[in-house]
């Protein structure tokens, strides 16, 4: 379904460092890059996450109600990725833990540009 998600940034170098460190927790690395765009993935054939300097030259802004969800295969990985995001300066939007009775386990945060993300697993 999802091929990739791109997030705008106003500080390309800081965002690149944030996502290099954050996504390394789940084995993702850069696989595409230019002077205004970087994409990370675990494999080039799987969905990826990218940052970009907006094409129109205007300031990047976080979408109200927009959220990127990163799926992992264990609660330990949810905990590790959420903790790493906070360590790197992300803003807490809801600590890692169970949500409801369906087995959904997630942690929510905002990156350095205010984009909202979560990391989750089921079961």
Image (cartoon, rainbow, N blue to C red):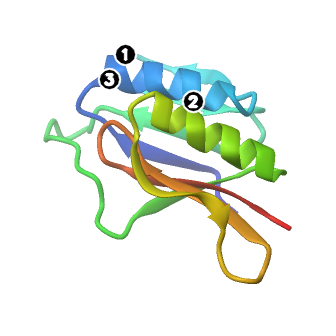
The correct choice, above or below, for 88 with respect to 71 in the image is above
The residue furthest left is 58
Q: Which residue does the image show at 29% across and 40% down from the upper left?
A: 113
In this view, the residue in front, 50 or 55, is: 50
**Any mark on residue 35, and which?**
1
Residue 120 percent location from the top left of the image: 68, 58
Labelled pair 2, 1 in contact (Cβ < 8 Å): no
Under circle 3, the secondary element is helix
Q: Which residue does the image show at 47% across and 37% down from the upper left?
A: 86
The correct choice, above or below, for 117 with respect to 86 in the image is below
Circle 2 packing at 10 Å, graded few (<14), some (14-19), many (20+), is many
Of the image marks 2 and 1, the number of the one nearer the N terminus = 2
Under circle 2, the secondary element is helix
Left or right of 62? Residue 119 is: right
Q: Which residue does the image show at 69% across and 29% down from the upper left?
A: 25
Q: Quadrant of the N terminus?
A: bottom right
Circle 1 packing at 10 Å, graded few (<14), some (14-19), many (20+), is few
Q: Quadrant of the C terminus?
A: bottom right
**Any mark on residue 12, and which?**
3
Instruction: Name the quadrant containing residue 83.
Output: top right
Query: Does residue 36 appear in the picture of this structure?
Result: no
Q: What whole-number distance in Å separates the C-alpha atoms at marks 3 and 2?
A: 15 Å
Residue 109 percent location from the top left of the image: 45, 51
Q: What whole-number distance in Å separates the C-alpha atoms at marks 2 and 1?
A: 21 Å
Of the image marks 3 and 2, the number of the one nearer the N terminus = 3
The correct choice, above or below, for 105 with respect to 29 in the image is below
**Any mark on residue 82, and which?**
none
Residue 66 percent location from the top left of the image: 39, 64
On the image, numbered disc 2 is attached to which residue? Answer: 22
């Amino acid at each position: 379904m999802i091929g990739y998600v791109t997030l705008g940034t106003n500080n390309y170098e800081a965002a690149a460092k944030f996502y290099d460190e954050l996504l390394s927790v789940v084995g993702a690395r850069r696989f595409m890059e230019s002077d205004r765009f970087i994409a990370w993935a675990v494999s080039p054939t799987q969905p990826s996450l990218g940052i970009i300097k907006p094409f129109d030259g205007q300031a990047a802004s976080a979408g109200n109600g927009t959220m990127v969800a990163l799926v992992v295969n264990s609660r330990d990985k949810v905990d590790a990725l959420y903790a790493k995001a906070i360590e790197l300066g992300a803003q807490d939007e809801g600590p890692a833990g169970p949500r409801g009775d369906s087995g959904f386990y997630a942690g929510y945060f905002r990156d350095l540009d205010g984009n909202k993300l979560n990391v989750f697993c089921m079961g």
